[in-house]
Amino acid sequence: MGIAWLFPGQGSQSVGMGKELAARYPTAARVFEEANDALGFDLRALCFDGPKEELDRTANTQPALLATSLAALRAAQEAGAIGEPAIVLGHSLGEFTAIVAASALTLADALGLVRTRGELMQAADSNGGMAAVLGLDADVVARTIVGTAVVVANDNAPGQVVISGPRDELERASGALKNAGAKRVVTLRTSAAFHSPAMREVAPRLREAMSLLTFSPLRYKLVANVDAKVHEHARELPALLEKQVWSPVQWVASVRRAEGDGASVFVEFGPGNVLTGLVKRILPDSKTGNVADETTLRQSLPLLEESA
């Protein structure tokens, strides 16, 4: 029974995340200590105590989620014999966490990289936003928004698609999507039009930042957001991560690809359980779990150990 490790992206953050696991598991606490040293500020305090407004700043959210998700994985590894995954995947920012989990980037290098990524994304587009479209599949959404400056940003699950673009165009697209049968179109709490052409200007500087890093061999196979294909070679990662910032996250196809590559159990490491909820909609018969705190760790440990 193969297991896939999942790592969440922006939007899953909350004040207090990681605090309980860091108090109980030294390996989780060490992740936050390393993060503070790598970044030169108290990321641990920001995760544990807020304030929320600072945690929600993209440049802070991205390293905070990476550290918290990796701490959750380390806590689970300390708590039991959880074995190794058949495959790893992360949603947007979570893809960087997956790469750290697969030993292709060090924690310190990844934290610096996503801090830079967050700063660049935050500065790139002040007029853009994102919205979740509920009740329509991605192909219908894509057809309906033709002629607007809005694009599909995330194909998250059947009936749940995220669009991205200028705020005024999002309003126009929202009306068209409701006329096409969308149950709801919900504006998301984001600071820019992520995973859209507005982020293309970020790509060269992100490429430059990655050129200074050493990518080690991938210990585990990775399903990439941009193409929903399995990748096993670290040399492919910089180009994939550069393209990811302005391309749609193909989450539905990625989860199905992981299943096709042997995964029947999906466990999410990090705050919340957004990804496991999406997996259940994509693959209703799959087994899922999440590790966000001590309660969810204990609930998921038998599943993790069963897959070892």
Image: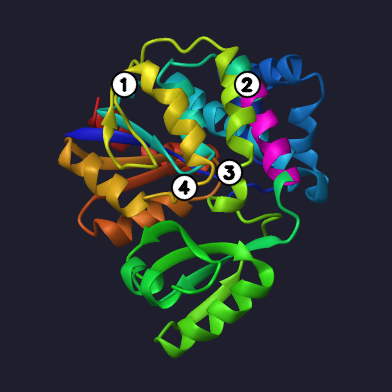
Between disc 1 and disc 4, whose residue precedes?
A: 1
Query: Closer to the N terminus: mark 1 or mark 2?
Result: 2
Are dots 1 and 2 in contact, CB under 8 Å? no
Q: What distance separates the C-alpha of mark 1 from that of mark 2?
A: 24 Å
Range covered by the magenta-colored residues: 112-123
Residue 299 on image: x %, y %? 40, 42
Residue 13's x, y, as percent?
64, 47
Amino acid type, residue under disc 1 in the picture:
Tyr
Q: Nearer the viewer, residue 178 or 266?
A: 178
From what the image shows, is residue 263 above or below residue 199?
A: above
Instruction: Describe the element under mark 2 as helix, strand or loop.
Output: helix
Task: Residue under label 2, please give it.
Answer: 209
- The structure residue drawn at horizontal position 24% and vertical position 56%, both measured from the top left corner, is 283
> Is residue 37 visible in the rendered structure shown here?
yes
- Can you name the residue that lies furthest to the bottom here? 179
Depth check, mark 3 against mark 1: the one in front is: 3
What's the amino acid at mark 4?
Ser
- Looking at the image, residue 279 sits to the left or right of residue 292; the answer is left
Q: Residues within 10 Å of mark 3 (few under 14, many from 20)?
A: some
Mark 3 or 1 closer to N-term?
3
- Whole-Å distance between the Cαs marked 4 and 2? 19 Å
Q: Position of residue 69 (x, y in %)?
A: 54, 33
Percent position of residue 78, x then y? 46, 19
Above or below residue 232? Residue 279 is: below
Residue at numbered disc 3: 200
Seen from this angle, which residue lies furthest front?
A: 147
Which residue position holds label 1? 220
Q: Image point 67% across, 15% down: which residue? A: 34
Residue 247 image label? 4
Is label 3 in contact with label 2 (beta carbons under 8 Å)? Answer: no
Q: How many marks?
A: 4
